[in-house]
Amino acid sequence: MKIVIAPDSFKEALPAEAVAGAIARGVCRVQPQAIIDMIPMADGGEGTVNALIAATRGEHRQTTATGPTGEPVAATWGMLGDGSGTAVLEMASASGLTLVPPERRNPLQTTTYGTGELIRAALDHGASQILIGIGGSATNDGGAGAAQAVGVRFLNKAGDKINTPLTGGRLVDVAGIDLRPRDLRIGVTPIRTACDVENPLCGPRGAAAIYAPQKGATPEQVKILDHNLAHLAGLIKRDLGQEVRDLPGAGAAGGLGAGLVAFFGATLQPGIDLVMAAVHLAERIAGADLVITGEGRIDRQSMMGKVIAGVGRTARAAGVRTIALVGAVGEGADETLAVIERYHAINPPDLHTAQALPRTALNLETTTVSVLQKWLRTHAF
């Protein structure tokens, strides 16, 4: 019997690889002879690097990069272990909101410069392609800071190069963009970007209006940031011949989606699709008898580019049944039954979160035992 275990992390409780391990222990208690393939998953957001490194037996790397407020941070990234030469990065590792204390959060003053340094580090390590997750940003600079880190020249009104890292508040100082000094490896190295939002760069659904308040911006600052991103979009159109203002996903990560397309030649793709391709999920599911997936909460959003939906669709296409183990069940959870056979909560509904989190590994294991025993009684192998 072959069982594929492909869960997401249980946020605030366990990373995806630990979730997979707990489920595997439960499987072994019921079916000691089962062939188990553990594939920690992610949707392109937080935990993507660790999940992909674990799933492909890759290697972690660490680079000292410029943090969102200009101070150095130790940013982690990795190389996949599948021989493809693929580097995997998370912008949040260098430019994330968690790196800025709440009292200092102000997207007028934060930069993605460190994200560009991570991309450069991956290229220095010999990466032949790059996957980058862009969730959890502290920034609203349209990716201009990241572009500076790989040599893109931004000019002020006097025609002089702007040398200090650009921030959301300083985009208005830019009067010209010159790609010619850019690192020659950019543009010839494929960069695929995990982007799970469709927001444009500017306007009422843009990066500033929707996401800047979560990063500490006041209503007045939101207006400034939106104006500055529109200014940058105009320069990108004039100097680079690219229209990014209304590009779906351009507003992700404070406009980094737009910047990666314009300055790096990147493509924007749903994060779960990138992860599934990187771990060769379809090939590994083929021939399995059962897939077990899961995440911390299942609800209507689970069908919107999340791990359960992605894994369930892939397994269904291969004719393999999928069950999901989850920490909590929310409204709309039954919509996932279009792609999975059933879901099971590992926690009693009346158990307080503070009590449930420390017991996540144990509850995953014991629930797996119970669910698999019932499964085997109704399915012959």
Image (spheres, helix red, strand yellow):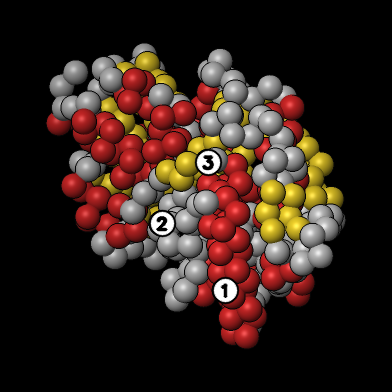
Image quarter hosting the N terminus: top left
Q: Name the residue located 53 percent from the left edge and 23 percent from the top edge.
A: 56
Q: Residue 287 at what x, y percent from top left?
A: 26, 17
Task: Judge by depth and name the residue closer to the eye, 25 or 163.
Answer: 163
Residue assigned mark 3 = 266
Disc 3/disc 2 C-alpha distance (Å): 14 Å
Q: Residue furthest bottom?
A: 220
Residue assigned mark 2 = 248
For the residue labelled by badge 1, is the local secondary structure a helix, a strand or a loop? helix
In the image, 105: left or right of 228? Answer: right
Q: Residue 324 at what x, y percent from top left?
A: 32, 42
What label sits on residue 367 in the rendered view?
A: none
Q: Please name the amino acid that badge 3 sits on.
A: Ala
Quarter of image, res 78: top right
Quarter of image, res 129: top right
In the image, 65: left or right of 270? Answer: right
Disc 2/disc 1 C-alpha distance (Å): 16 Å
In the image, 234: left or right of 312? Answer: right
